[in-house]
Image (cartoon, rainbow, N blue to C red):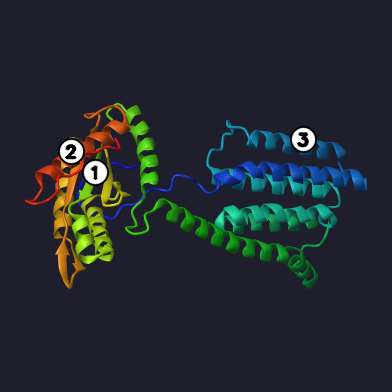
């Protein structure tokens, strides 16, 4: 998470920390082994006369070694997307070589070209799919050249190109569209699981994971620092009892929007539960965090919501916990913020208000 100086109000969001492509890396090697097995079984079962048997054996051995290396944690290509693209290119090359040895353009093994095309369509998007398809097409045309077939743009060659590679293009297009829809649905489901339905802020579970992860990052840095704010709405029970829960929900939404306006894009606000919110401020000193806390109080106070036929306002009490000032564990930082929030609530009590409950969950 990037650290920037505080300047007020932009809507923030949590970065997506997992690359969708990573999930495919585990199964790609299995598909590669399947390709290798299909080639071996075909050559044995058909007893095909290979143009250069030694070259075929060397090619199959080299492809097997590539599969083993591909699964290694020390594989030099680290980016999942780049690894998938590299695997597709190597697979196309392998299929081309064994096809050349077993009949060139007439070899049934040319149908294996569909596998890297589908793999690209599922994982690499339009540009990656187009690049892999073009590479496949060039290799397919090259098989004709190696077989001594004329490559003039005659109708027969064009017809064969459309007949054999046309279905590949249709499968790639449909797969890419379907994969895009699936990825979009997965992102929506993940977003629903991570966010509070009423406010749109991330929920407590997501915030706890984020804080645990970011605490490790800051704790391992020489000058690591961050702050956590705990904010609790004042007199929300009075709003619910007087105007109903719909008015209470409106007040919660107004407070959440005000908190979002008070923080920068790299900060993360969450609904901690009920009428409580929390904000993670990466790189913030205690002084900066106190300024943000005051800005949150001001923003919430200035935000109005509709209830009882008129505009109403709500206030919040805010406490600040700071690393490393308040401890070396994230739990200690949250506990400090919680204590100071209740202290702030006690100072802000109006005559007749019940005494605020003391924190018991920390």
Rounded to the nearest angstrom, the CA distance separating label 1 from label 3 is: 60 Å
Please tell me which residue lies in front, 211 or 182. Answer: 211
Please tell me which residue lies in front, 234 or 47. Answer: 234
**Quadrant in the picture for the C terminus:** top left
| Residue 182 on image: x %, y % | 56, 59
Pick whichever of labels 1 and 2 is earlier in the sequence.
Answer: 1
In the rendered structure, the answer to whether residue 22 lies left or right of residue 190 reads right
Mark 3, Cα crowd under 10 Å, few <14 / some 14-19 / many 20+, is: few
Q: Residue at x 82, y 37 (%)?
A: 57
Mark 2, Cα crowd under 10 Å, few <14 / some 14-19 / many 20+, is: some
| Residue 231 on image: x %, y % | 22, 47
| Residue 86 in the image: above or below residue 118 | above
Q: Could you tell me if the residues under marks 1 and 2 are in contact, i.e. CB atoms within 8 Å?
A: yes
Rounded to the nearest angstrom, the CA distance separating label 1 from label 2 is: 8 Å
Which image quadrant for residue 145? bottom right
Residue position for label 1:
230
Q: Secondary structure at mark 3?
A: helix
**Quadrant in the picture for the N terminus:** top left
Q: Residue at x 63, y 36 (%)?
A: 71
Mark 1, Cα crowd under 10 Å, few <14 / some 14-19 / many 20+, is: many
Residue position for label 3:
61
Residue 135 seen in render: no
Pick whichever of labels 1 and 3 is earlier in the sequence.
Answer: 3
Which image quadrant for residue 324? top left
In the rendered structure, the answer to whether residue 77 lies left or right of residue 229 reads right
Q: Secondary structure at mark 1?
A: strand
């Amino acid at each position: 998470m990037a650290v920037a100086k505080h300047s007020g109000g932009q809507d923030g969001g949590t970065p997506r920390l997992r690359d969708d492509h990573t999930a495919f890396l585990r199964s790609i090697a299995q598909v590669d082994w399947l390709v290798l097995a299909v080639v071996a079984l075909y050559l044995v079962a058909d007893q095909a006369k290979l143009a250069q048997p030694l070259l075929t054996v060397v090619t199959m051995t080299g492809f097997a070694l590539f599969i083993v290396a591909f699964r290694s944690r020390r594989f030099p290509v680290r980016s999942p997307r780049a690894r998938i693209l590299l695997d597709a290119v190597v697979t196309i090359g392998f299929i081309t070589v064994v096809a050349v040895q077993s009949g060139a353009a007439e070899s049934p093994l040319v149908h294996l070209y569909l596998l890297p095309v589908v793999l690209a369509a599922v994982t690499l998007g339009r540009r990656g799919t187009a690049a892999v398809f073009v590479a496949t097409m060039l290799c397919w045309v090259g098989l004709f050249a190696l077989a001594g077939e004329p490559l003039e743009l005659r109708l027969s060659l064009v017809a064969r190109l459309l007949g054999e590679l046309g279905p590949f293009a249709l499968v790639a297009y449909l797969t890419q569209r379907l994969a895009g829809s699936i990825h979009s649905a997965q992102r929506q489901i993940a977003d629903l699981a991570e966010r509070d339905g009423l406010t749109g802020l991330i929920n407590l579970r997501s915030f706890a994971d984020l804080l645990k992860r970011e605490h490790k990052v800051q704790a391992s840095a020489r000058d690591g620092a961050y702050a956590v704010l705990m904010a609790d709405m004042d007199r929300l029970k009075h709003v619910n009892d007087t105007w109903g829960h719909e008015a209470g929900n409106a007040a919660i939404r107004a407070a959440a929007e005000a908190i979002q306006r008070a923080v920068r894009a790299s900060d993360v606000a969450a609904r901690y539960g009920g009428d409580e919110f929390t904000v993670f401020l990466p790189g913030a000193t205690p002084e900066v965090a106190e300024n943000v806390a005051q800005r949150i109080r001001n923003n919430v106070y200035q935000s109005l919501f509709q209830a009882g036929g008129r505009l109403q306002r709500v206030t919040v009490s805010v406490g600040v916990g700071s690393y490393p000032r308040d401890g070396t564990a994230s739990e200690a930082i949250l506990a400090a913020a919680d204590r100071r929030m209740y202290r702030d609530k006690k100072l802000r009590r109006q005559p007749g208000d019940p005494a605020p409950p003391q924190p018991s969950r920390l």
